[in-house]
């Protein structure tokens, strides 16, 4: 399964809506995806949680002109700018959205309910104050694309050397789903994004898929604890490159508007 963070969907389709490129209904439907419902809590001017349509309209009225993604991990505050409370909440969720034009950030809280096979997922986006400062460690699209090309080569070498190359029925199913999704021409990003961003996002998802399959596909030949530790250590920088590229792709619409 491809990594598609909820923060990425909110930022991409929120940016398209703010730019007037899609309707509110289209934006909200694309953001919610397969989830049951999304609500926004803590929005200035609202006494309780509200729906996405109202929330996006309220954010526009508050001066929000764009949305950026943050995908932090322990030791890597990717896309964050503070303050500590917001950073801590974003790190716990491993993702967040930061508004441009208003000092607001949104962190998702995901709730699942229902029996196995019929689980309903609801998402509450908690609005918190953020520091207006450049986000941490976000590369340009060009930098991200160059880093990804190298990371893809490194990941292939590492997985082969450690005898954990993606193989077996689970890996084959995931790779088949990836190919089918690509061949179907699925719109990876919302209208308004440059073609290079779509290319970088697809490559980042491919690298992330390879790494995920390596972890999910058992121990392979790396049966010793030292070998498993070596695998994790070797794959960590590849994971970081993929996350940096995802953030660069999702944030590119805002970056292009600011440059233009």
Image (spheres, rainbow, N blue to C red):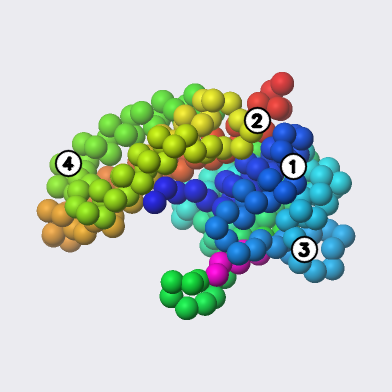
Question: Label 1 to label 2, Cα distance in Å?
Answer: 13 Å
Task: Give the residue displayed 49% in from the left and 48% down from the top.
Answer: 4
> Percent x, y for residue 203?
41, 34
Quarter in which the C terminus is drawn? top right
Left/right placement of residue 150 relative to residue 9 reads left
Q: Nearer the viewer, mark 1 or mark 2?
A: 1
Residue 38 seen in the current view: yes
Identify the mark nearer the N-term, 4 or 1: 1
Left/right placement of residue 92 relative to residue 260 reads left
Q: Which residue is mark 3?
A: 50
Q: Does the CB distance between marks 3 and 1 fall below 8 Å? A: no
Q: Is residue 230 above or below residue 256?
A: below
Identify the mark nearer the N-term, 3 or 4: 3
Q: Which residue is mark 4?
A: 160
> Percent x, y for residue 18?
75, 39
Identify the mark nearer the N-term, 3 or 1: 1
Task: Give the residue displayed 49% in from the left and 38% down from the top.
Answer: 186
Q: Main secondary structure of the magenta part?
A: strand
Outermost residue, bottom side: 115
């Amino acid at each position: 399964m491809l990594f598609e963070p909820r923060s990425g969907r909110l930022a991409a389709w929120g940016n398209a809506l703010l730019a007037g490129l899609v309707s509110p209904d289209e934006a909200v439907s694309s953001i919610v995806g397969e989830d049951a419902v999304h609500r926004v809590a803590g929005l200035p001017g609202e006494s309780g949680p509200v729906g996405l349509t109202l929330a996006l309209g309220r954010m526009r009225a508050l001066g929000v002109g764009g949305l950026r993604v943050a995908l932090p991990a322990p030791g890597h505050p990717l896309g964050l700018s503070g303050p500590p409370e917001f950073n801590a909440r974003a790190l716990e969720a491993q993702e967040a959205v930061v508004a441009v034009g208003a000092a607001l950030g949104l962190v998702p809280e995901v709730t699942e309910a229902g029996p196995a096979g019929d689980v309903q997922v609801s998402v509450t986006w908690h609005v918190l104050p953020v520091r207006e400062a450049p986000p941490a460690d976000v590369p340009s699209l060009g930098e991200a694309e160059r880093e990804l090309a190298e990371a893809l080569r490194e990941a292939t070498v590492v997985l082969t050397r450690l005898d954990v190359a993606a193989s077996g029925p689970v890996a084959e199913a995931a790779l088949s789903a990836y190919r089918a999704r690509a061949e179907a021409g699925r719109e990876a990003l919302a209208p308004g994004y440059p073609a290079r961003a779509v290319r970088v996002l697809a490559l980042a998802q491919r690298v992330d898929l390879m790494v995920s399959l390596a972890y999910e596909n058992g121990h392979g030949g790396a049966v010793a604890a030292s070998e498993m530790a070596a695998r994790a250590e070797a794959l960590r920088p590849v994971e970081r490159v993929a996350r940096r590229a995802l953030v660069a792709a999702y944030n590119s619409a805002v970056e292009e508007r600011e440059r233009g």
